[in-house]
Image: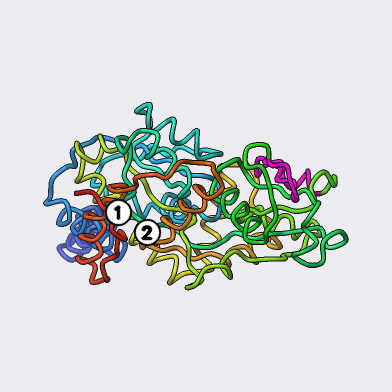
Amino acid sequence: MPATATTRTTRTTLRRGFVAAAALPLLIGALASCGYGSEAKKDEGDKAANAAATGGKKLSASEVRIGYFPNLTHATALVGLQEGLIEKELNGTKIKPQSFNAGPSEIEALNGGSLDIGFIGPSPSINAYVKSKGSNLRIISGSASGGVKLVVNPDKIKALDDLKGKKIATPQKGNTQDVAFLNWISEKGWKVDPESGKGDVSVVRTDNKVTPDAFKQGSIDGAWVPEPTASKLVSDGGSVLLDETSLWPDKKFVITNIIVSQKFLKEHPDVVEAVLRGTVKTNEWIHANQDKAKASANARLEAEGGKPLDAKVIDPAWPSFTVTDDPLASTLKTQSDWAVKAKLIQQPDLAGIYDLTLLNKVLKAAGKPEVSDAGLGAE
């Protein structure tokens, strides 16, 4: 039976409806790819901000190699990498992350040209700068303050004076915690040979990875260590006898700062500046999102070691330190004086160890106060 005009019109309308319906997902996808939708708008906004910060140009290095420790006191690195907050500022420059267990190995990588930027403690920074006669690195930012505790076996040690004659671990001879503990011992009027660790207190240099086992086995009576090792010892029955923060006048001291190879800084200042924008934004995000940041740091630690920190470890450890852009330069000078006093190093010339030019540029652009190099800045 031949179709009427009305029937033909109806079929045409239906066909058009089917075509339109079929095309709708494609249209939505096309619109999203063109920057429509909340997520797309956010991504485009991030890209636009990054492009503006870099002048819309690709940065001068195709990759940047960043080193850090799997410690909570390296939270800026852990969270910044885990959340992509540093990478977002690099406008296509790739990050090559490298994890280290101790300062000397990170410094060796920096000196050998296989590392560009590193998160590291003040003592390794000082030692490396002095040994190279001021030619290998600059400190370009702060990262963390605090997070160091003296944890002891409460059955053997009930008061600070009870440490005499006991075996107390530090992570490494001449490292930041070792220097602080040797200085504390000296101020007590006790004697310890800084090289051997023998004396009124036995200072046992023990890798943070094995310190908890040594504590459980009784081969050490306590440890002066950073987080999360300190809280691991507490979870194994230890007791916090002293928080190092209490020893500092303003309750602040540098535990982690950011260093850069002088060669990389000279050749790729735009990349260094971009990384610092990322670390400043990371620290801001951590302060504003403490619980999320704690979970993010733990996720990164799990990726590094295959196992996240238990809540009974990370929960007390997390609030014991503070991330900061300020390198707290005056406290680094104090720690250097302690190392000289302990006869671990000769009186160093630290002039030029800091170059905070790019950090202060980033801070100023973000509406934040600039920070001081305590007179130890590069010319």
Question: At 88% from the left edge and 61% from the top edge, which residue is drawn?
Answer: 155
Residue 223: percent from the left, percent from the top? 71, 52
* Real-space CA distance between mark 1 and mark 2, rounded to the nearest whole angstrom: 8 Å
Residue 365: percent from the left, percent from the top? 19, 65
In the image, residue 136 above or below residue 296:
above
**Amino acid of disc 1:** Leu
Q: Residue 376 carries which label?
A: 1
Question: At 34% from the left edge and 28% from the top edge, which residue is drawn?
Answer: 113
Q: Which residue lies furthest to the right in this view?
A: 155
Q: Are marks 1 and 2 in contact (CB under 8 Å)?
A: yes
Query: Is residue 341 in view from this perspective?
Result: yes
Q: Nearer the viewer, residue 226 or 232?
A: 226
Assess whether residue 28 is covered by the magenta stretch: no
Residue where numbered disc 2 is placed: 329
Name the element at disc 1: loop
Name the element at disc 2: helix
Q: Which of 99 and 342 is in front in this view?
A: 342
Question: At 38% from the left edge and 49% from the top edge, which residue is drawn?
Answer: 258
Q: Is disc 2 surrounded by few (<14), some (14 to 19) or many (20+) residues within 10 Å?
A: many
Q: Nearer the viewer, residue 51 or 155?
A: 155
Residue 241: percent from the left, percent from the top? 72, 65
Assess whether residue 211 is covered by the magenta stretch: yes
Q: In this view, does 99 lie to the left or right of 151?
A: left
Q: In which quarter of the image is residue 95?
A: top left
